[in-house]
Amino acid sequence: MPDASPPKLRARRAGSRDRFAFFFGTDSTTLEQRYAETFGARLAVVDIPHGGDIRRCLASLTESGMVLQQSAMSLMRPQRLVFPYEQAMALAVAVRPHPRTALQLGLGGGAMVRFLSAYYPECELTIVESDPTVIDLARRHFYIDTPVEQTDAITFLAETEQRFDAIMVDIYGGGGFNAPPLAFWDACAAALQPKGCIAINWAEARDKPVYELHAARAAARIGRTFFLAPDGFKDNVVQLCSADPALDAAGLRRSATALARRQRRKSILDRCPILDDFP
């Protein structure tokens, strides 16, 4: 069918496709593109050959024309966490001996949903995502068929009476970190079970001054804090805040080793420093 949209709109669409193809390579295949209003950016689902596998990526296009990878999935092993920072965030669940409840704030491509379903099927996961397009793309392309609370993280925590063994905070949009009020971290602490743990993804180095302010509030409200830099300070930093005062670096490494054995892969902490302060 011919494209009857205005020439300028057709040009913008073509430009978006070209930027995704340029970023991922000419052998990539863009399955779908849509503008996500609440997220605030154009999103694309792209398949990229990766050895003998296909890696499916949820990517966004910033206003400056930069392509960012929001989430990725191996088509051969959908349950596998692709990005190192995701593996680090999974430790929020692993440090609990028998986690029964977890909260995911920010859906993306649903990596943590597939991971928990495969390796912690007894753990009931609550998913919160504000953007309907993100939810729809996750259902259509990333094997997500579980219920999703369509609301923002701040509203959900203000209204919920549930308590969670683990909370994973990954709240980003087209403009970067969706910085909540500092009181948000008080609400996170209140939603934790005793000895629960929160994992926070701090994604872009340019936002470090903002991150440090929020990271300090989370640490003050929750308890023992560790900072993990699985990519050697080049990319995401993960903050783990545990309400268990007995958790130390040695205990964290033991939990990471046990989680790695469950997945039949190397421990993320084999190549990741554990720091007391934001790097």
Image (spheres, rainbow, N blue to C red):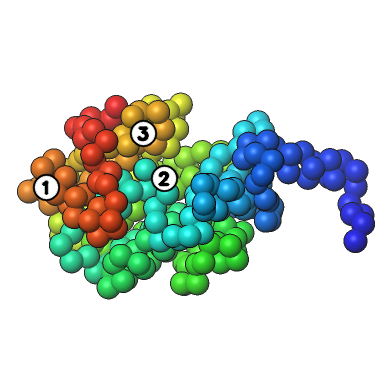
Q: Which residue is mark 1?
A: 251
Does residue 173 appear in this view?
Answer: no
Instruction: Tell me: 40 left or right of 159.
Output: right
- Residue in front for this viewpoint, 233 or 105: 233
Relative to 9, residue 158 above or below: below
Name the quarter where the C terminus is drawn: top left
Q: Which residue is mark 3?
A: 231
Q: Label 3: state its secondary structure.
A: loop
Work out whether mark 2 precedes mark 3 in sequence or the reverse, and give the earlier one.
2
CB under 8 Å between callouts 2 and 3?
no
Residue count near mark 3 (Cα–Cα under 10 Å), binned few <14, some 14–19, many ≥20? some
CB under 8 Å between callouts 2 and 1?
no
Residue at the spot x=25%, y=60% of the render?
A: 262
Instruction: Return the residue found at the far front.
Output: 52
Distance of label 2 from label 3 (alpha carbons): 9 Å
Residue count near mark 1 (Cα–Cα under 10 Å), binned few <14, some 14–19, many ≥20? few
Instruction: Return the residue found at the far left.
Output: 246
Q: Which residue is mark 2?
A: 83
Nearest-to-viewer mark from 2 and 1: 2
Q: Label 1: state its secondary structure.
A: helix
